[in-house]
């Protein structure tokens, strides 16, 4: 799996958009970009994933740069319940996912 | 979406005993399951890959004789922590390998506390 780099922590005001960046400059052509989050004492929760195109679902949007070397997860209207550690993972078909340290997002009232 | 279950959700045991953790893929048949552990304030670390009908493969530093993995069927994998010690106290999480390009879901985790 390609290594990913994320900021250690970020704050966001409740109701505002949270933009979480991720660098994956060594990503290979068959690797997807996955985003998960983990709330304390729970298993990782799937958010979204994509290969080349931008993706959107009911939880978030994923913006992948044209060269695929970085991506941004967007939570359009952050709530207090979005406070969690967010993990960006680049993984291929084997889905052997390697977790980095992630970004601790704190949504503040 | 796909659901992964783990049992038990938490367990407390005495040092020296063995603990079995079950992971079930409820939505699809999984020929492969991945097992992770997570120590407090750390990220998830891959321990081993469980393959149905064959031996598991372990990451460097993970003792295969201590963490016994059995992939009994296409929907069930078990992790047995043998002769558990306090340093084995951790959060154990599994995930079945998803079909190509599909969503990869993780189990809710099993918290093990060894006294």
Image (tube, coloured by chain):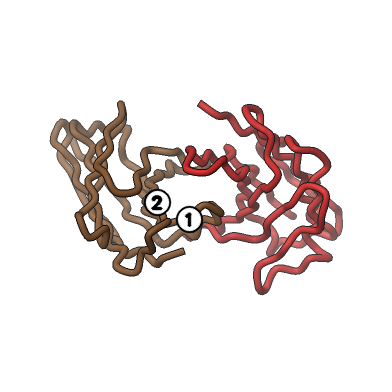
Chain colours: A brown, B red
Could you say where residue B60 lies in the image, as x and y percent from the top left? Answer: 66, 73
Q: Is residue B110 rendered to the left or right of residue A23?
A: right
Q: Nearer the viewer, residue B105 or A33?
A: A33
Q: Nearer the viewer, residue B16 or B77?
A: B77
- Mark 1 and mark 2 in contact? Answer it, CB < 8 Å: yes
Q: Is residue A79 rendered to the left or right of residue A43?
A: left
Q: Nearer the viewer, residue B114 or B54?
A: B54
Q: Chain of mark 1?
A: A
Secondary element under disc 2, as helix, strand or loop, is: strand
Quadrant location, the C terminus of chain A:
top left
Could you say where residue B44 lies in the image, as x and y percent from the top left? Answer: 52, 56
Q: Quadrant of residue A21?
A: bottom left
Q: Name the residue: 25% across, 53% down.
A: A71
Up/down of A101 relative to A83, above or below? below
Q: Name the residue: 40% across, 44% down.
A: A37
Q: Quadrant of residue A102?
A: bottom left
Q: Nearer the viewer, residue A16 or A34?
A: A34
Q: Which residue is mark 2?
A: A32
Q: Is residue A109 rendered to the left or right of residue A82?
A: left
Q: Which residue is mark 1?
A: A92
Secondary element under disc 1, as helix, strand or loop, is: loop
Q: Chain of mark 2?
A: A
Work out whether mark 1 precedes mark 2 in sequence or the reverse, and give the earlier one.
2
């Amino acid at each position: 799996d390609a290594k990913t780099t994320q900021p250690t922590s970020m704050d966001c005001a409740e109701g505002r958009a949270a933009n979480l960046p991720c660098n994956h400059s060594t990503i290979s052509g068959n690797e997807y970009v996955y985003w998960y989050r983990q709330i304390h004492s729970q298993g990782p929760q799937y958010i979204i994933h994509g290969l080349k195109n931008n993706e959107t679902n009911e939880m978030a949007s994923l913006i992948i740069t044209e060269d695929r070397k970085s991506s941004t997860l967007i939570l359009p209207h952050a709530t207090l319940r979005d406070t969690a550690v967010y993990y960006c993972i680049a993984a291929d078909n084997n889905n052997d996912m390697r977790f980095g340290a992630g970004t601790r997002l704190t949504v503040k009232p | 979406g796909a659901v992964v279950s783990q049992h038990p959700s938490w367990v407390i045991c005495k040092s020296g005993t063995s603990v079995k953790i079950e992971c079930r893929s409820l939505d699809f048949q999984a020929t492969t399951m991945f097992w992770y552990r997570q120590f407090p304030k750390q990220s998830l670390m891959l321990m081993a890959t469980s393959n149905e009908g064959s031996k598991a493969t372990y990451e460097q530093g993970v003792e295969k004789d201590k963490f016994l993995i059995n992939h009994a069927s296409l929907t069930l994998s078990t992790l047995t922590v043998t002769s558990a010690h306090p340093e084995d106290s951790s959060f154990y999480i599994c995930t079945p390998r998803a079909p190509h390009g599909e969503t990869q879901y993780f189990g809710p985790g099993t918290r093990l506390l060894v006294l």
